[in-house]
Every structure is written in structure tokens, then in C-alpha cells.
Amino acid sequence: MTAAIALTMSGAAPGGRPALPSPAGDKSKLGSIEKPNVEKAELTFYDAKPQGSGGGALGGERGKVEFQFNPKELTIAKAAKWERSNDAKAKKAGPPQFSGAEPCKMTLEMFFDATGEHDGSVVAAVEKLFQCCVPTEETLGQKKPSPPLVKFKWGTISSFPAFITSVSAKFTLFAASGTPIRATCTVSMEEMPADLGKQNPTSGALAVTRVHKTISGDSLASVAYAEYADPTLWRELAAYNGIDDPMRIPEGQVLMLPSPEALATGAS
């Protein structure tokens, strides 16, 4: 089993690999009545610790917002990017090429209710969520100001480190003074990529070099345009791949496609 992509679980079965759910359900406790210990979900906030390749890591904890009522559902999305190089004269579409994984995205709802107190606790909770969409005071004076990172936790389950992309608060009940005492918040977050580290032990490069297998109709200029949006980079691409005759690219040749920075410097 590979490492978890979206949710991790602590306290798993021996070996760290929980079994898949039984189609017939758990019959081990039939006949016994146990009141489950209800764990409250929470969003925990952390300082963002910048990393070398533009990713981020969790720094010190800076607070949390607890769920008054556990969410009824979570939406987690993960997608892959595929690209095709099509030839206008070809009868069939070109083969798809994997060009990278999209970050995980999570959407959830948080419900706050202060009808028993009629105080400003709902406003305070919503404001905490809004503050996750703006840079922290500690980073405002830095070159790269950043908001806090967050992590969803619910009992033994915890999500990927993420940054909040949007918060939508709908106030549905108010006290006589006008203070909101009930609100539903929709929170969307996106995975913060971690530092991938050095991918090439000989060069120390931080970026992943992709590859492209040429098909009929490909040229260095067309590949440079598709990859870098600049067809004039065909010379650099030829030099990077050690191609002596850039006007003749045989079908099926594998081209190395480095990052724009590595292409400009000729690092391999």
C-alpha cells in the first residue's frame, strides 16, 4: 500500500494498514451496545515555513477553530494532468502524456450557533476563518508574505497541510441587537506542496525534468511552444538534448523538458 495522499490515520491496526470495510458490515459487536466517544473535528492553524522549491511546511501552531457540530460530509478532489500533441493530418488523436499531478482540494462546511448565549462567538469564529485568507502580521514585512496553513483533524484522521482559498459565510439568524448568532461557512482549501528536494543527485536540481516522445508533425519549435509558450526556445531545447540537426527530429525521439530556469542555464 502506498502512502496516503489525502487523509492519514493514526492509531491504525498493527502494521499501519487498516483493513477495507466489510461488505456485510462489522458483526463483531452485534448484541452489545456501546456508546461511541464522539470526537470533535477541528481546523488547526500553523505558521507557514517556506521551503527551497516554493513549497511550504507546517511551522508552529497558532490556534484552531473547533467544529460545534461535526461535518456531515467532506469533498476531496484529486486530478492528474494529461496532455496530447495532435497532428492535423493524423486520423487518430495523439497518445496522452502524463504532465503532473494536481494538488488535492478539500471543501467542507462549518456550522456555528450561539442562540443560547446571544454573544459574538459566531462572529469571532467566522473572523478566524477569514484571517486564513490574508497574510499574517509576522510575514507582512517579508518578501513573500503568506497566510497561515491549516490542517483538518477529526479524531484519528488528519488531512494534508493546506492553504485556504476561499471562505463563504452565510449568517442566518441574528439577535435583537443585530449580532449574528448563527452562521454556515463553506471553506475551500488546497494542498500546500512540500519541498520535493533534490531530484538529480549529480546536478542538485530542484525541479523535475519531464519528457516528451515526439509524434508525426512535431518540431522543436512546436514542442517549445507547447511546453514553454515560446517557440523561439527551440535552440536551447536542441542544445539541452544534444541535437545536432534540429530540423530533423525523428518520430519517437524522447526529448528532455527541463524547467525554464534549467533550460536557460543549460543545466542538466
Image (cartoon, rainbow, N blue to C red):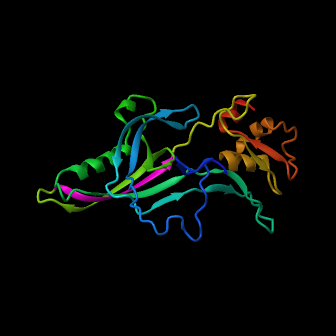
Pick the front one: 14 or 20: 14
Residue 36, image quadrant: bottom left
Asked if residue 181 is among those painted magenta in the image, a careful observer would answer: yes
Q: Where is residue 25 shown, x and y percent of the image? A: 55, 68
Residue at 58% across, 51% down: 13
Residue lying furthest bottom in this view?
Answer: 24
Front residue of this view, candidates 135 and 191:
191
Residue numbers of the magenta segment? 179-191
- Residue 81: % across, % down: 64, 55
Residue under the point 38% across and 44% down: 132
Please tell me which residue is depicted at 51% across the width and 54% down the height of the picture.
105
On the picture, is 26 further left or further right than 264? left
Residue 189 sits above or below residue 240 on the image: below
Above-or-below relation of 265 to 5: above
Q: Quadrant of residue 90?
A: bottom right
Q: How many marks?
A: 0
Judged from this view, the residue extending furthest toward the front is 31
Q: Is residue 268 above or below residue 73?
A: above
In the picture, measured across the screen, residue 116 lies left or right of residue 90, that is left
45 w.r.t. 75: above or below: above
Residue 248 included in the magenta stretch of the image: no
Quadrant location of the C terminus? Answer: top right
Q: Main secondary structure of the magenta part?
A: strand
93 relative position to 114: left or right: right
The picture places residue 200, in percent across and down from the top left corner, at 73, 33
Tell me if residue 147 can be seen.
no
Please tell me which residue lies in front, 189 or 233.
Answer: 189
